Image (cartoon, rainbow, N blue to C red):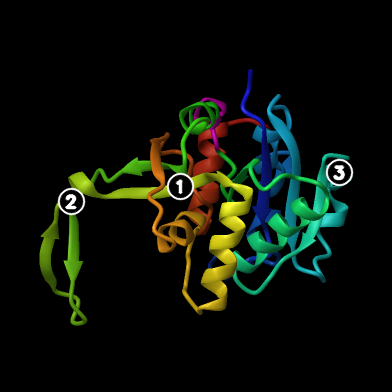
């Protein structure tokens, strides 16, 4: 049987580095926008219990998407930071009857090339894990630590360095508690795993594909168009 899970998509960012006329998650690639592609991998999964998309209160783009009317999807108010948005999404799930022990996946709105096999690998690999974890990719290139002057201080051992991706998968109650506590203490958390780490937990890494990229710059869009070659 498939592992059952809820999904939270923080999508309140503006994507300033794209220098576009709209947030990057709404930029079109093929016959859909990035956010629609992102949701596509999850919506046909048998383990999906429901989705919360966290968008800005004044977001004019989300209501125009056909997927916004999917009965499995709820809209929550996005916050100033990623953690604020995710926390709002988790709270909505609890308010609507989700259990604190349920698995919840958090995935970047602008990470549209998640492979189904990676999603299944994450779900099966963490199904019985006491903490949870995330998709990640081991560092491939030589890494340098630099000083303020831009000069190399040392070469870092890449064998112990991994690049964190999403989805990230944790128990709903544990993740909500970790994010809430971190925000109350003014701790900067850049992803859900770092919030869990701050509470003393050690998330497990599940190796995924390197092409599960997060769209950040215009050349990322060019890359997607090349590898997809046709509308998805």
Corner quadrant of residue 105: top right
Q: Can you give x and y, in whole percent of width and height, for residue 68 in the image?
A: 84, 48
Of pointers 3 and 1, the one earlier in the residue sequence: 3
Going 14% across and 74% down the picture, which residue do you hit?
Answer: 151
What number of labels is visible?
3
In front: label 2 or label 1: 1
Q: Main secondary structure of the magenta part?
A: helix
- The mark nearer the N terminus, 3 or 2, is 3
Q: Residue furthest top?
A: 1
Mark earlier in primary sequence (2, 1): 2
Q: Nearer the viewer, residue 123 or 141?
A: 123
From where the camera sits, is residue 174 visible?
A: yes
Q: Which mark is residue 142?
A: 2
Gap between marks 2 and 1 measured at Cα: 19 Å
Q: Which residue in the protein does label 1 denote?
A: 165
Height in image: 229 above or below 93?
above
**Mark-to-mark CA distance, 3 and 2:** 44 Å
Q: Residue 157: where, in percent of width, then height?
A: 15, 52
In the rendered image, is residue 15 in sight? Answer: no
The local secondary structure at tag 3 comes to helix
> Neighbour class for label 1 at 10 Å: few (<14), some, many (≥20)?
many
- The residue that appears at 12% across and 59% down in the rendered structure is 155
Q: Is residue 35 above or below residue 124?
A: below
- Residue at 42 percent across and 63 percent down: it is 198
- Crowd class of label 3 (few under 14; some 14 to 19; many from 20; radius 10 Å): few
Q: Residue furthest left?
A: 154
Quadrant of the drawing holding the C terminus: top right
Give the residue at mark 3.
66
| Foreground of the two, 198 or 154 | 198
Number of the front mark, 3 or 1 = 1
């Amino acid at each position: 049987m498939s592992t059952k899970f809820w999904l939270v998509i923080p999508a309140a960012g503006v994507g300033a580095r794209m220098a576009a006329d709209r947030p990057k998650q709404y930029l079109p690639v093929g016959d859909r926008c990035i956010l629609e592609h992102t949701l596509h991998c999850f919506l046909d999964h048998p383990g999906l219990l429901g989705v919360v998309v966290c968008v800005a209160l004044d977001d004019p783009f989300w209501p125009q998407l056909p997927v916004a009317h999917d009965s499995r999807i709820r809209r929550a108010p996005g916050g100033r930071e990623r953690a604020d948005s995710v926390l709002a999404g988790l709270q909505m799930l609890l308010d609507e009857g989700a259990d604190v022990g349920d698995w919840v996946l958090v995935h970047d709105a602008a990470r549209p090339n998640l492979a189904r096999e990676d999603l299944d690998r994450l779900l099966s690999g963490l199904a019985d894990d006491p903490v949870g974890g995330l998709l990640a990719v081991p560092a491939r290139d030589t890494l340098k630590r630099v000083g303020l002057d831009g000069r190399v201080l040392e070469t870092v051992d890449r064998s112990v360095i991994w690049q964190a991706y999403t989805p990230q998968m944790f128990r709903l109650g544990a993740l909500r508690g970790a994010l809430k506590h971190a925000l109350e203490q003014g701790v900067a958390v850049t992803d859900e795993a770092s919030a869990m780490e701050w509470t003393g937990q050690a998330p497990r890494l599940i190796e995924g594909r390197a092409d599960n990229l997060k769209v950040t710059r215009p050349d990322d869009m060019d890359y997607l168009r090349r590898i997809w070659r046709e509308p998805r």
